[in-house]
Structures are given as structure tokens and as C-alpha cells.
Image: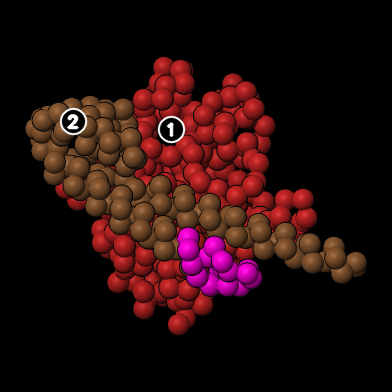
Amino acid sequence: MNNGVLLFANNNDQVDYVKQAIFLAKNIKKHMRCGVAIATDSPDYLYSQYENHIDSVDHVIPIDWHVTQTNNYKRFRDGTMSEKNLMWKNTNRSSAYELTPFDQTIVLDTDVIINNDRYNACWDQSEDFLIDSKPVDVHGTRVDTSFDRISDKSVTFYWATAFFFRKSATTKIFFDTINHVKENYDFYRMIYQIIPTKLRNDFVFSIAIHIMNGFTANKEWPKPMPARMFMTTDKDMLHEINNDSYLFMLDKETHPGQYTVNSIKDVNIHCMNKFSLGRCIDKVLND
Amino acid sequence: MDRRLEKALEFGNYMATLNNQKRLLKEKFLDQSVYYIDGHKFQITMELINYCKTLLDLDHTHDIVLIDSFETPYRVPDLKAFLDEIMHIYFSNLNSYHTEFNKIKNKRSIQEIVDNE
């Protein structure tokens, strides 16, 4: 089978998702040694800006982005003391089934850091679809229940940050369901008691999973990804990348602007602070 | 600021870093203590190791059905080979965990703790 990782990289005014995708592609080649495809609305930028790193990418898939499609704006934090309201071009995720050049695909957010080969276990297992619902918070004492359910009295939160799918009749139905939820998001948002109006892939996936399970809280499907995802929020900051070791400044919840530090290596990390990730990637790619 | 309070706050930061670093080492150990075989995933625990060893001691050596981490049954063709493999992964990770834990447990500054990773 043809296996690979698909990344979506649609830049906005201040976040260079293409740069993150290039860095992630290099990590995937280093640790997982499988194919990498980047779907982007900025292929020219990718080729011109990162021509020295393009050998890490097997497929570049141009995608269209129409500003009128969804004027999705989101608050992007850079630690606890800085935030910006920027466009969030995140709605292509549901087209992964059609866009992927692979028979078996892992879709990753570009702000994921791959640090081991354990996702390779996806290729040989029997499930057609895998997705995580419970990452490990790098912060040891943060109490945050907002990632348990998509709203206080609603369904289990699944992370569209990292998921695996194999092309099959079931996954085709699943992706069609995702598109249906996306197209009727205002309706489902009210039914599932989601307060924020912006479309979020995690919510769409969680709702589609609930529908596919016959509107029940079934624990049997879908199964989790083979390796656990460690996560930091955008209130935390990635401070330094040293080989495969990542030094994070972790938000002190009761003291905004103050941080504790911890370093971590050999695990996959979702680094939601895109600004700090971008700064660290600059240093690595320029070395 | 009162010098005593300043010292206490400094120590608090050190403890927060040390304790979280220990927790992260444990989480990494759990993440790595996994055995994949024929599309099945087994979280390697002392319970699984002991169960396999008990079966072997009772001369159940081949075609043993185990429940994997996805709650799916899997027929193990050769239990001895299975046990050897999970023991190898478990102890290799356990030794790394032990080594890394010992590196940080006596460190007395935040810089020393995070430099070790």
C-alpha cells in the first residue's frame, strides 16, 4: 500500500503554516520515513521560499481558498501576554479523502512535532480510522476541562490534529458526514450546544463521530492513534529546539506572564503556540 | 521583597519544574511501553508480563488468545516469543526511564534539570 502523511498549510497574514509544514515534513522523513504531501493555497510561496528543503516533500497539492467561503477568524495567542485575531483557513480538512495521494493517510496539523516512528503502527493495524480524544498535557497541573467535551453537556471531544484513515466504504461515509456537518454547521452548532460561532475541525469531527455511532457515546469506534500526543496550549511557549529536545515555557495559570520550564524529547507534541514554533523553526532551518 | 519569601518562591519554581519533569519521564515511559504485532496494540504492563509468564508456566505455549489494548482478541502463535519481545521492550524502556530519572532527581537548579533532556 501507498502510505503517507498529508499536511494542510494555508498561510494567513502572520502565521507561516508552510514553514511549519516544511519543518514537520523533515521530521516525518527523519523518524517515520514515509511519503509526505502538503496541500496548500500558496504553492508558489512554498517552492520559492523553501526550495532548499523541498526534497522532504513528495507531493505538493495546490488548493483554492476563497475568502468568502468562511470568514473564520480566531484568536492566536503567543503566551499569556500577547494575542492576535487572524484569519483561520481550516476548512479544507474535510477534503482530505479526495485530496490525499495515498491509500493510507495520516493527516496532521502543521503545528505537530513528530519525534518518533510510532505512528508507523497505523499502516498495519486493521482499523480504517483512528483519532485521539485524550492527549497528554505537558503542563503538569493545568486543570482544563474544555478539551473533554465539545461543550459542557455535549459529546466527547476528538482532536482532528492527528488522525489516520484508510480509503474504504466506511471512511467515505465518514468524510461525507463531515462535509454534511460542515455545510449545516449553524444547525449542528445549536444542537450540540457549541457557543463559539467559528467552525472548528475538532467540533465537526466530534459531531460526525457521534452521528456515525448512532448518536451514542460508543467507546468502540473510533480507536485512538498508536502513539499518544503530548500537547501544549498557545498560552505556553516553545523556547528552544536542541536536536530532538524541546524546551517549553509553561504558563503559570494563576500568575499570567510567568512561566515554568520543562524539556521533552522522543514524544510527539502538539505545539499550539504557532508564533513561538515559527521562531524556533527559523533557527533550525537557518542552521 | 522579604528574602525568605523570595527564596521560597524560587524553590517553588524549582519544585514545579522537577516534579513536572519527573511526570513527563513517566508519561514518556508509558508512551514507549507498547508492542505492536499484526495490527494489534499491547500496552506492556507488569500484569501482562505476569499473565504471559503464568500461562507459560502452565504449559500453554502456542495459539493463546489475548485481549489487546483496543479490547480486540488476538491469537498469539508463540507465547514465548511474544513474552520475550514485550520483556525486551519493557526493560529497555524501564532502564532508560531509570537512567533519566536518576539524572534529574538530585539536580538542584532548574537549568540543570532541563539541560538533561
Looking at the picture, how far across and down is residue B72, in whole percent? Answer: 26, 28
Disc 2 on helix, strand or loop? helix
Of circles 2 and 1, the one toward us is 2
Name the residue: 63% across, 69% down: B108
Colour scheme employed for the rendering of this structure: by chain
Residue type highlighted by circle 1: Ile
- Asked if residue A190 is positioned above or below residue A98 in the image, the reply reads above
Answer whether residue B67 is visible to the viewer in this image.
yes
Q: Are marks 2 and 1 in contact (CB under 8 Å)?
A: no
Q: In the displayed orientation, state which residue is furthest to the front.
A: B57
* Residue B113 shown in magenta: yes
Q: In the displayed orientation, state which residue is furthest to the right.
A: B2
Looking at the picture, how far across and down is residue B64, in whole percent? Answer: 15, 29
* Residue A68 shown in magenta: no
Looking at the picture, how far across and down is residue B115, in whole percent? Answer: 53, 72
Dot label at residue A285 = none
Q: Which chain shows up in red?
A: A
Q: Which residue is mark 2?
A: B55
- Asked if residue A177 is positioned above or below residue A233 in the image, the reply reads above
Residue type highlighted by circle 2: Leu
Quarter of the picture containing the N terminus of chain B is bottom right
- What residue range appears in magenta? B101-116
Q: Is residue A131 left or right of residue A234?
A: left
Distance from Cα at disc 2 to Cα at disc 1: 46 Å
Q: Which chain shows up in brown?
A: B
Q: Is residue A195 left or right of residue A98?
A: right
Disc 1 on helix, strand or loop? helix
Name the residue: 59% across, 21% down: A191
Closer-to-camera residue (A146/B19): B19
